[in-house]
Amino acid sequence: MIPFNKPPLTGNEEQYVLESMRSAKISGDGEFTKRCHKWFEEKLLCKKALLTTSCTHALEMAAILIDIKEGDEVIMPSYTFVSTANAFVLRGAKIVFVDIRQDTLNIDETKIEQAITQKTKAIVPVHYAGVACEMDTIMDIASRHNLFVVEDAAQGMMSTYKGKALGTIGHFGTYSFHETKNYTSAGEGGLLIINDEKFVQRAEIIREKGTNRSLFFRGMVDKYSWVDIGSSYLPNDMSAAYLWGGLERADEINDDRLGSWQKYHDRLQELEKEGLIELPTIPDGCVQNAHMFYLKVKDLDERTALLYKFKKEHIWAVFHYVPLHSAPAGLKYGRFDGIDEFTTKESERLVRLPMYYGLSNDEIDAVCDVINFFYGR
Ligand SMILES: *Cc1c(COP(=O)(O)O)cnc(C)c1O
């Protein structure tokens, strides 16, 4: 059996979780949370990094911080996870879906401008598979129309766009440490990146249930009170302790994944040359993190047949997002702007192969054998 994913376990996680439990500061913003914050701020080069209970919650915080209100419109791709949309729908926004690019499956930056109306408040690019969206174009559109940019970088830890870490280019960035992502927290976890200093204080308040508790602890106010809306977005320190085990070995995890990605690519490129499948595109200026290795087959029927073969071999290859605009809640809370040229078509062709830290050469061979055999090679 080859699973689709395994959370990374590099060796020190157990010890750190125990240390955290014994520290008597387990509810949040303990030692390990502080270490993680420092690591992110130095490594990603951002003004402020705040651990959250999930990427879903980091997106919700961003929606509150940019004051999304009833009737506002938010532009994003339809080919994404539900939380990208839900965070803004919860504040009353209407979602405006824009088609994706055929090559990276990221939002098509050339179709954003025509989707902008008087009501548009933000653009939410999703860096699919940890491969960056065309951020220069997106930031230019945003600044000309006075819009916020919230980067959903859930899959993008260690990836860069023209040398900048994903999530540090827009006004906000969000990351996920769910067990399916490259770096994981115990339980679930996420991160909010704040790139404009003026949002930092309010973010700390929202994260702590709408109180000014962090200012109080720093001695900047003499009592702590309810000052804004907020929720319980602060993760427990044991979650951060597990994450710290992975961050300490971040390069090793990244190199290992990139090695597996390259092996898949090498073993499958013959089929691509013959025009039977398509492999991922990494545009110039983008450094990726091997979050995912996917291939695209001819159509839905061919994918169903290939996934059936994998299942028979006990290999967990899977498809991905069902486009949000076609889902029940998507019909209710959103609309698709322009034509769906690639969103549905490409999503139906996509197959994700097993990918995790520690994936062995034998496993990669076994996966590629199924594909080669399927195409009669
Ligand atoms: C995983 C993921 C999320 C949600 O992350 P959680 O930490 O599980 O809340 C959001 N957006 C994208 C693109 C994701 O891949």
Image: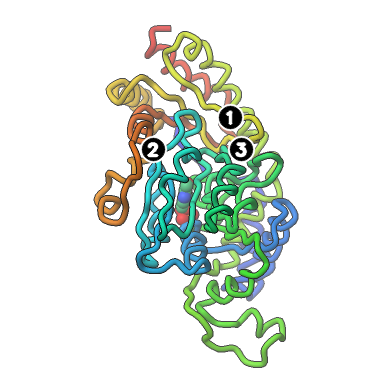
Q: CA distance from mark 2 to mark 3?
A: 18 Å
Given this view, does label 2 or label 1 mark the residue nearer the observer?
1
Q: Nearer the viewer, residue 264 or 43?
A: 43
Instruction: Point out residue 283 in the picture as x, y percentages from the top left corner.
Output: 60, 30
Q: Which mark is residue 320?
A: 2
Instruction: Point out residue 212 in the picture as x, y percentages from the top left corner.
Output: 59, 82
The correct choice, above or below, for 101 with respect to 303 in the image is below
Q: Is residue 170 left or right of residue 308?
A: right
| Badge 3 or badge 1: first in the primary sequence | 1
* Residue located beneath label 3 in the image: 289
Total labels: the figure holds 3
Q: Is residue 57 left or right of residue 132?
A: left
Q: Look at 35% across and 40% down and name the residue there.
A: 338
Q: Nearer the viewer, residue 53 or 300?
A: 300
> Residue flagged by tag 2: what amino acid is it?
His
Instruction: Point out residue 326 in the picture as x, y percentages from the top left corner.
Output: 27, 44
> Residue flagged by tag 1: what amino acid is it?
Ile
The quarter in which the C terminus is drawn is top left
Q: Nearer the viewer, residue 21 or 291?
A: 291
Element class at badge 1 = loop
Q: Look at 50% across and 40% down and name the residue there.
A: 109
* Residue located beneath label 1 in the image: 282
The correct choice, above or below, for 93 with respect to 231 in the image is above
Mark 2 surroundings: few (<14), some (14-19) or many (≥20) residues within 10 A: some
> Residue flagged by tag 3: what amino acid is it?
Asn
Mark 1 surroundings: few (<14), some (14-19) or many (≥20) residues within 10 A: some
Q: Is residue 300 left or right of residue 17?
A: left
Q: Nearer the viewer, residue 362 or 340?
A: 340
